[in-house]
Amino acid sequence: MVSSHLYIHGKTETLLPLSARHLFVGVKGKNPDGSLKNFENLKDFLVNQGMIQEKDCACVVEKENKQIGSSSKSKPKDKKKSSKKENAKANPCFGKMKGKKVTKIRNLQIVRDVDERELIELLQRGPVTVSIEVADTFKLFKGDEVLRGYSQSESLEDHMIELTGYDTTPDGINYWEFQNSYGLGWGKNGFGKLIRKSSRKKHEPSLINAYMYPELLEREEAINAH
């Protein structure tokens, strides 16, 4: 999302290979399965910490090694070492960022009152990250058919995808084109189609429950040496 917007709006000359691993490890407040508990933590990371390129990501969190056969007496804690370990847990690349380029944004707009007409306008400016509810079967989906949502009797969880466009099938079904995060083996080469509200029944809401997009800094501000 961030890399695409920077390129589309002329902030970078090429698509930056920003590290998804650094983002995943660095964002605080995740569920046990790695999904986000809330979008505010993602916003805080992108605005205040920033992303780095894949080649610069170390993402090694220090772990305390247990000494087998060591004395049971507890040793006094070294405050400096303890502080470094806490920083390492908070920032996986702590102490390894000197001279690296860090990419930040001005703000991450998070919209929960979904208006699909506004989404269409936003897509003219670049991809839009959205949150949808999915069932377990979503993870194994393959093919090119339009996804139409799930029954409320199924166990559902929030999942983030990236809208890349919109279109209509030959038989008149309006849909969103999106890229998933499960690799090329999912859907059709990693991409899928999601039915738009305009092709659902009148009483049925949008399948998108929230969306977000970045407000960019000026070019010289967006990518700075750390």
Image: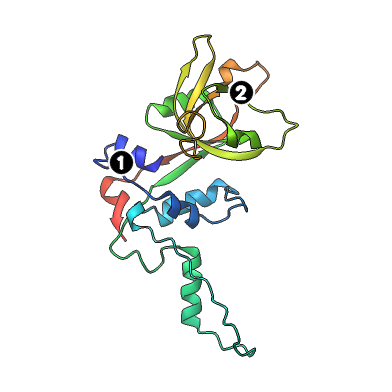
Q: Is residue 158 above or below residue 79?
A: above
Residue displayed at 58% across by 16% down: 199
Regarding residue 184, the answer to whether it shows in the image is yes
Q: Residue 93 sits in which quadrant? A: bottom left
- Mark number, residue 15: 1
Element class at badge 1: loop
Q: Do residues under tags 1 and 2 come within 8 Å of each other at their CB atoms?
A: no
Instruction: Say which of 205 and 31 sits in front.
Output: 31
**Relative to 217, 119 lies left or right:** right
Element class at badge 2: loop
Q: Position of residue 134 (x, y in %)?
A: 62, 35
Regarding residue 135, the answer to whether it shows in the image is no
Q: Position of residue 80 (x, y in %)?
A: 46, 81
The crowd level at tag 1 (other Cα within 10 Å; few <14, some 14-19, many 20+) is some
Marked residue nearer the N-terminal end (1 or 2): 1
The crowd level at tag 2 (other Cα within 10 Å; few <14, some 14-19, many 20+) is some
Residue displayed at 45% across by 64% down: 60
**CA gap, disc 1 to disc 2?**
32 Å
Instruction: Say which of 45 and 115 sits in front.
Output: 45
Quickly name the residue at label 2.
148
Q: Quick one: quadrant of the N terminus?
A: top left
Kind of residue at disc 1: Leu
Kind of residue at disc 2: Arg
Q: Is residue 148 above or below residue 180?
A: above
